[in-house]
Image (cartoon, rainbow, N blue to C red):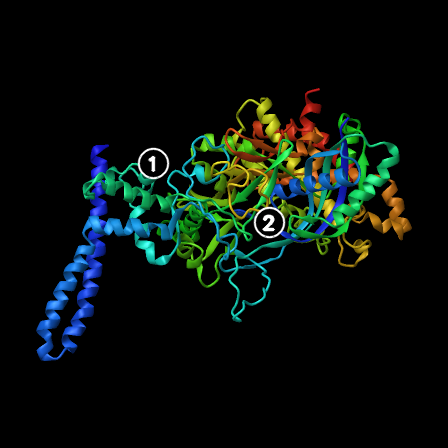
Amino acid sequence: MEREERTLSEKIRDYIDSRKRDKLEKFDKDTQKGVSAASTEDVAAYELQRTALRVTEEGRFKPVNWLSDAANRAKQLQLVTHALKFTHSDAKGTSLFANANKSASTFISTSSINNPKIDVVGNAAALDVGKLLLLESDNGKLLANFVQQNDMSPFEPFAESKAQLNDWLGGFKLAVTAKDPTSHKLSKQLYWPVDDDYHLVLPLYGTSLSQEIFERVQYARFSEEQKEARAARRSEKMSDIATIEFQDIAVQGFGGTKPQNISQLNSGRGGRAFLLSSSPPAWQSQQKPPLKVKSIFRGPFSRRVYGQIMGLKKFLVANLNKRSDMKIRTERARRIEDIVDQLVAYGTGVRTSSPGWSSLPDCHLPLHQKLWLDPKRRDFDKEFENEFDKKEWQGLVAADFSRFLNTELEKNSDIATGDVEFMQWKVLTAQELRLVKDDVEEAF
Amino acid sequence: MEKLLVIRHLQVEAANAIAGITWGFPAMTSFLGLTHALQRKVQAGISNKITLSGCAVICHASQVQAHSNNMSRENYFALTRNPLTKDGSTAPFNEEGRMRMDISLLILLSGPTPPMFEDELVEFIKSALLTSRVAGGKVKQLGEVELIKDIGAINRESGTRKSFLRKLLPGFALVSRDDVLQSHIEESQKTPLDALLDFSIKRMAAQTKGDRAEWRTERLDYIGWLKPIMVGYQGISDLYEAGEVGHVRDRTCPVQFVESIYSLGQWISPHRISDLKHLFWQQEYHADNALYLCKNNYQPDAPASLSSETD
């Protein structure tokens, strides 16, 4: 513990030194211009003045002085994990530095990140103070965390007195705590019912969480590792690294052309945040009627369930040699039902098309599929109605479906279809399908 | 005896399509907020003995007002042009996402509803809905509203339950699958965030096949339309006494700063469930860990075909 705190003190000293170097370099450069511009007789005086100025400038960067100044300016900015301006860029009110709350729930939030990136909001002129407080000890604890816990040990070597240390603590504390919490008319304020009364909850944007997601998406897209893996995939070569692609990402922009106005991390993200999709299935558009195909199981429907069928196949192959216990049977049945659900949903989707579409010359579907997918044609087609009332079509569609499923499962399978085990599960799936058939028929 | 309010085909325009770090459907908090707002209107207009305690959402169709760019595979929201500022420059703004949706709601209702008031209640709900905001959007059209006086009667027997639920097709109901997320966290040994992100990622890995490599999509061992969803709020500050926080809209109730929390949800075909209760969401508050939660008690059942097989 002792050693680690010393290293953090070292880091503080290094940081101040680097600020000093930058500043003095700039000072020298600027004043050099003055020296060359000054007339010969003034040079000596100017040099004298310059040296004096340089001494004061150096004095400002004596750690004790610089820290006092920094502690004074700390109130101009705030280190946060949750920022308000993402809600509305003109909102003025409290942003927060949330302490890692280990007693928090198991739900995903900022507290489920181990070392959240800290954001800085406020006056950009005080950013150097922000960088100071974001110095990190070797075990990942930020200087800001020390300040939060009233632990001033990393600052001890620089302070001249206990009182000064306390002044600094008071100053820096303003950058990590929200004093006088306020909300604003442009911030979100929601009522949440609690017993017979309400709590007012004020949601703040989790900029640290957003940063984590942003970094992972950027890694997937631009990291060398991923680029190499993708190149290997394109040329069908081996690679130890799996390619990662975030699917259905949306971009939300904050701050327009001035992302810095929202926050420091937002500026680093170019004012963009990535959103994960939670949309319901088949959200794209209305189901188009399946024209120009001989069966919905060749194209329109099979595309839709490709993923599920691959999943089922993988599952069946993996459990080929295992004894068929309750767990496996349940899983298998559930996967098949999942595909049946898609069939039912597909059917209801197509049936929202304008009645009579199945009489178009482009429709090459067998009669039973037409009866299933275009039932409203009965209203003006007597012959169609008669066929419909025979109720033979349900069985035929279900038979089509089970044939389709079996063919798909056997296709390109690693196992020869003659294998005893393979035959066995085929029998089992056939059993399940018979039961599912009743279900499908009911749904028509 | 619990009753059920069935609101069919509520068509909403310009609803909020962003919920924290997710997009594509409004957060469950919106629908529970609507339920509570309806309760307040009903209590003020019809009877203060009626409570609306939970809500299920079935989405029939939805369309986010966004466009995608095939090159970067990102979706961008169609944005509104806002009024200029005083000096004529563009007002700074943070993007919002909007969507159209066609949903049905099932709302749990309890309290006395004498037959003579039933029609009045239904009519009242209809007009209240037409003047309500739904997830920030406007109600464009409203289908049938129906009051079912005994949930048990349709819930107990699988035939009646199925035929009731089938009327909600085509559509998908949103349920919580925190159980799947927790087991994935445990089995994969990943951080909770990475485990959640796995459900938004397509991962492909190489396997040797002869002298070449074959790249295959690695699928998770979970099935169904599983998506990250926003499920409520977590307190990130102390709970302040009424009036302690400045510039709030109401100085008579306690105030807490919160952040959105996320979990895994699943869109299921509603006719698959074995108990209507599995579809409902409820608002909860847990004082011990400052949790404002939208809670759903979905339980995956043994598939119907299996139970008949073992008979």
**Numbered label tally:** 2
Against A90, residue B106 (above or below) is above
As drawn, A259 above or below B62: below
| Amino acid type at image mark 1 | Gln
Q: Chain of mark 2?
A: B
Q: Chain of mark 1?
A: A
Q: In the image, residue A195 lies at what x, y percent? A: 63, 31
Where residue A8 sits in the image (x, y, percent)? 24, 41
Q: Residue furthest top?
A: B311
The x, y position of residue B246, in whole percent, is: 51, 46
Same chain, labels 1 and 2: no
Residue to which mark 1 is pinned:
A149
| Eye-nearest disc, 1 or 2 | 1
Instruction: Answer few, some or many: residues within 10 Å of disc 1's Cα (few below 14, many 20 plus, some between 14 and 19).
Output: few
Q: Given the image, on which type of amino acid does mark 2 rest?
A: Gly
User: Dot 2 corresponds to which residue?
Assistant: B24
Point out the image quarter for the N terminus of chain A: top left
Name the disc covering residue A61, or none. Answer: none
Furthest residue to the right?
Answer: A382
Residue A403 showing in the rendered view: no
Q: In the rendering, at what x and y percent does residue A132 appear?
A: 29, 49
Distance, label 1 to label 2, CA atoms, is 41 Å
Seen at 49% across and 39% down, the residue is B196
For the residue pair A286 and B139, the one nearer the viewer reads as B139
Rendered residue at 30%/54% (across/down): A128
Quarter location, residue A57: bottom left
Q: Nearer the viewer, residue A232 or B76?
A: B76
SS category of the residue bearing label 1: loop
> Crowding at label 2, few (<14), some or many (≥20) Cα neighbours within 10 Å?
many
| Quarter of the figure that contains the C terminus of chain A | top right
